Image: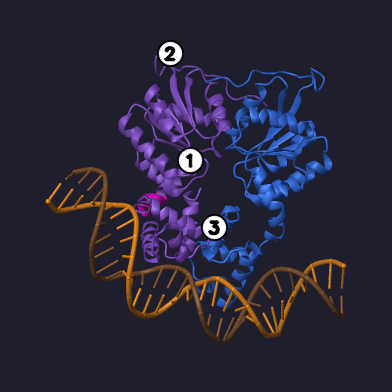
Chain colours: A purple, B blue, C orange, D brown
Amino acid sequence: MANEGRPDVSLGRRSPMASTRIVVADRNVINRVGIRSILERNAGFAVVAEATTYEAVMDAVDEHGPDVLIIDLDLGDDTTRGLKICDDITENYPSTKVMVLANTLNEMIVVEALRRGVTGYLSKDEVRADELSKGVKAVQDGETVLGKGVGNIVARGLGSVRGQMEHLTDRELDVIRAVSKGMSNKQIAVLMYITESTVKFHLQNASKKLGTHKRAELVGRAHAAGLLK
Amino acid sequence: MANEGRPDVSLGRRSPMASTRIVVADRNVINRVGIRSILERNAGFAVVAEATTYEAVMDAVDEHGPDVLIIDLDLGDDTTRGLKICDDITENYPSTKVMVLANTLNEMIVVEALRRGVTGYLSKDEVRADELSKGVKAVQDGETVLGKGVGNIVARGLGSVRGQMEHLTDRELDVIRAVSKGMSNKQIAVLMYITESTVKFHLQNASKKLGTHKRAELVGRAHAAGLLK
DNA sequence: TAAACCCCTAGCCATTTGGCTAGGAAGGGA
DNA sequence: TCCCTTCCTAGCCAAATGGCTAGGGGTTTA
């Protein structure tokens, strides 16, 4: 029951003593402990910090300057913030590679993440323990690692998704959330202290961004994209 | 970074040498390793088997007769099978307590699981490491453990959900799925080889069952309920 | 300072809904 | 057999939506 490929220690691709310094970001303790345990079976890995919020991720990266950041983009209500973090890291901390460990594979998110310089993308549900370790190693060495299923998504996504996710504004999201609760434009207007016209305006804009033509589809898409917590 | 309440070993509620035998069922390695690591920090716990499929769960329980089964009901495409397993276990292996560790809290699933004799229900995203250990211990001792949020759901659910989720029919689900893709009644009619009237009929029925009044709300609800895969 | 966004508002019009009433037909149990 | 459920169809009408065009004001940024 407990076999796993023994710790194949340092293969010397870096100086034998140097270990890969890793920051793990996931809101979920179980995942953090699991990732840490899997990686630290190998002598070459050291998880130097854990983070559970978007702020904490930035702090940890800034403080520890890790070789690899393993992150679940979904640390809060708004996955978009996870994407922003990818931007920040690849921009300001080029020596830190980013590997996304996602719960669910969402076309839009995958493509956007890769566009922002993420070099690893694995699905929690599909990854095996050894794949995770190897993946982290590979990412650190500058390779791009895409898990099962991720590849296909990329192939499909690169063309079509292009302008699809151009970031919904706060108000647009607010409106969509209200819509998903069944509110009419009039009700939403009252709720948000704006006119019905404005509600329609936001909806039209959001629809164009997501390429939808009906509010039902809008909430379907938003939900599938993880925008509706 | 590594403090966690030291192993408070056997408190003597059972004979000091006896450890709590646990089976962990989760499709996800990271979770399995995480759960195991967290629990085995305490001397009183032993994870005797892991399972990744519905069949494997039954086999493991049958073979090891564990004190506690920790399970994520969502081991495949069909969460319903997870519920059936709860039935089986509580029925045929009464000495094995079942603790559900869910990714997402879904009203229907929570209520159904509890109705089938599950005595522990925690959310992966919200549980803390010590809560998990304590929870398992408590469940083993016959207590009922409900995590954050679960309690509220139960409170709401027991009354209202009662007849709310009276099972959507196949056709109703088909229609809802189409709606969530933005199709109009007319389009759906063509797609399903029925008239527009019938489409509206199914929608009306589904709406009554879910207590919604707009198709956007319908897909919102269906999505939140995990009906739209 | 202009360009680029975001937010707000107005009105028009064809379509699509939501909600209702009122049927018919087929299959599974009690 | 009768009852219950699911599935199918029809028509009506008020209300809501989608898709436009055409504005104004505010902030940030190049």
| Labels 3 and 1 touching (C-beta < 8 A) | no
Residue B193 is covered by the magenta coloring: no
The residues bearing labels 2 and 1 have C-alpha atoms spaced at a distance of 35 Å
- Principal SS element in the magenta part? helix
Residue at 41% across, 41% down: A81
Q: Nearer the viewer, mark 3 or mark 2?
A: 3
Q: Are marks 3 and 1 on the same chain?
A: no
Region rendered in magenta: A156-161
Q: Is residue A105 left or right of residue D22?
A: right
In the rendered image, which residue does mark 3 sit on?
A: B220
Residue at 39% across, 54% down: A171
Residue B81 at least partly seen: no
In the rendered image, which residue does mark 1 sit on?
A: A74
Residue B57 at least partly seen: yes
In the rendered image, the vertical position of residue A150 relative to residue B206, given as above or below: above
Quick one: SS at disc 3?
Answer: helix
Q: Nearer the viewer, residue B11 or B159?
A: B159
Q: Is residue A140 left or right of residue B55?
A: left
In the rendered image, which residue does mark 2 sit on?
A: A16
In the rendered image, the vertical position of residue A69 relative to residue B184, given as above or below: above
Residue at 60% across, 56% down: B227
